[in-house]
Amino acid sequence: MWPLLTMHITQLNRECLLHLFSFLDKDSRKSLARTCSQLHDVFEDPALWSLLHFRSLTELQKDNFLLGPALRSLSICWHSSRVQVCSIEDWLKSAFQRSICSRHERLVNDFLLQVCDRCPNLASVTLSGCGHVTDDCLARLLRCCPRLRALRLENCARVTNRTLAAVAADGRALQTLHVDFCRNVSAAGLRHLRAAEHSAAMLPDQPPRPRAPAAALGKLLPR
């Protein structure tokens, strides 16, 4: 009978360790990284952090992930009863509702500002239930992430037509734009964006640059 061979996890090569880490969630990756310096180095490898998904705003404050130039896809989807409070216009909120919002109203904006500084190669962003994210923050994201190809916004109450203007001005690589249940984005603003895309495409003296395909925008913007 052949003797039983055993191998310690640290005997695996770097490629195998990265593959192993890729199956773990953020908390599990952090826990494993605490066991030894070799696994901590794997945890800090930028190649491990090309995709980040957050299911609550409190996750943005944890230290179980890394932001860096390898990040390609980011999603923050907050499905909580408190989203309804965040979606109320500020002037209609009670003192109690304002106190609830004060605990987290800067979280998404502050996090996205870090993304602007550290993740220039970001290609896809999804924000759902982020009631306090602002036009200024999204405009900066579009300027700092020139390779952004997909932007999906759902139930983001503070987003207005100013974000659409920023898309027209700086979303040169953008191919997909979804705006759902953002009540301060008007149909007129969407039509204006569509007209701006059409006009820019017809100007013969403009230098060539990547534009969103008409078919893609046609599915998303009202006729």
Image: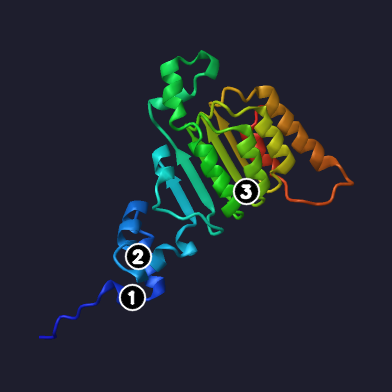
Label 3 sits on what residue type?
Answer: Leu
Label 2 sits on what residue type?
Answer: Leu
Label 1 sits on what residue type?
Answer: Leu
Q: Which mark is residue 29?
A: none
Quarter occupied by the C terminus? top right
Residue at 67% x, 40% y is 215
Q: Mark 1 or mark 3: which comes first in sequence?
A: 1
Res 136 → quadrant: top right
- Tell me if residue 128 comes above or below residue 119 in the rendering: above
174 or 59, nearer to the observer: 59
Q: Which mark is residue 12?
A: 1
Res 54 → quadrant: top left
List the residue tagged with mark 2.
20
Residue 170: x, y in percent?
71, 43
Quarter occupied by the N terminus? bottom left
| Mark 2–mark 3 CB contact (< 8 Å) | no
View extreme (left): residue: 1
- Tell me if residue 212 comes above or below residue 82 in the rendering: below
Residue 91: x, y in percent?
54, 15
Residue 209: x, y in percent?
77, 51
- The number of discs equals 3
Distance of label 2 from label 1 (alpha carbons) = 10 Å
| Mark 2–mark 1 CB contact (< 8 Å) | yes
Q: Could you tell me which secondary element the residue under label 1 belongs to?
A: loop
